[in-house]
Amino acid sequence: MIRPVKRLGQNFLRDPNTARRIVAALDVPQDSPVVEVGPGTGALTGMLAGRFGRFAALEVDERAVQHLRQTLPGVDIRHGDVLKADWRALADELGRPLHVVSNLPYYITSEILFGLVDARAAIGKAVVMMQREVARRIVAVPRTKEYGILSVVLQRTCVPTLLFDVSPNVFYPKPDVTSSVLRLDFAEGPGDGDDPAWFRTVVRTAFNQRRKTLRNSLGRLGAEVPERWRECRAEELSPADFVDLAAYLRGTLHPETLHGTDQTS
């Protein structure tokens, strides 16, 4: 047994039933290219490799890499850091769209998700497990405390679906929190406008001072917020509103075409 390393955020899944549910949640054809991120001791790896003909696993822990290569000979196990992964190159090698499965390390969940967002042209679906609190933020609706940057960016770049919760009891070591599994469909994302980087800048700037009205929080961007949203806070705008707001602030959307949130609602 590999001893979990705390700095790597390792909590190994030990329940075959949960593993089967996660694998089944990736509802794509068996000839689809699939990459597993952070396989650890291989709770999902054997099932995934057996189901999908074009499969590779990416693992940062050399001990786990050696363990998996010994226990699953013939399976493509690669030593590498997911934060440095070139998703487009992997998709070019294995095929497009690339699908991803992962029990995400809690401490780098957001970084991995934004990495997938940046490479979404090469990504089809992702089935990922994370802290329930983070999962709830991704699917949150406006005017709630959970609604924020992750909600807006993910809901515009993919279609997130909350599938099921996972008890801490099925991991070793047992984490202090409950986990949740989500499916992210990047192919069906409604889109984040003509300038994704600018869109994300507007969203981050607005939510980094979420108690302020947008007139005050976005003033540093050098453009005037449309009248209908001037006295709103970030949490009051829908993801679609933020797409329009970003385009307006960039000068590519005329104010008369804004269809934003009804302020009387």
Image: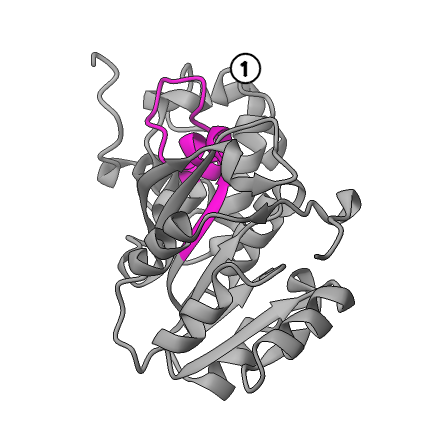
| Residue named by callout 1 | 212
Q: Hey, which quadrant is residue 155 in on the image?
A: top left
What percent of the width, then of the height, locates residue 217?
57, 23
Q: Secondary structure at mark 1?
A: loop
Q: In this rendering, does residue 223 appear at all?
A: no
Residue displayed at 20% across by 14% down: 265
- Check the image and report above or below for 28 versus 96: above
- Side of 260 relative to 227 (left or right): left
Report crowding for label 1: few under 14, some 14 to 19, many 20 or more residues within 10 A (C-alpha): some
Q: Is residue 141 part of the magenta span, yes or no?
A: yes
- Check the image and report above or below for 167 versus 142: below
What percent of the width, then of the height, locates residue 146?
44, 23
Q: In this rendering, does residue 1 appear at all?
A: yes
Task: Read off the magenta span.
Answer: 127-152
What percent of the width, then of the height, locates residue 38?
60, 60
Q: Is residue 93 part of the magenta span, yes or no?
A: no
The front one of 139 and 225 is: 139
Q: Hey, which quadrant is residue 136 in on the image?
A: top left
Residue displayed at 69% across by 45% down: 9
- Side of 16 relative to 79 (left or right): left
Amino acid, disc 1 = Lys
For the N terminus, give its image quadrant.
bottom right
What percent of the width, then of the height, locates residue 249?
46, 40
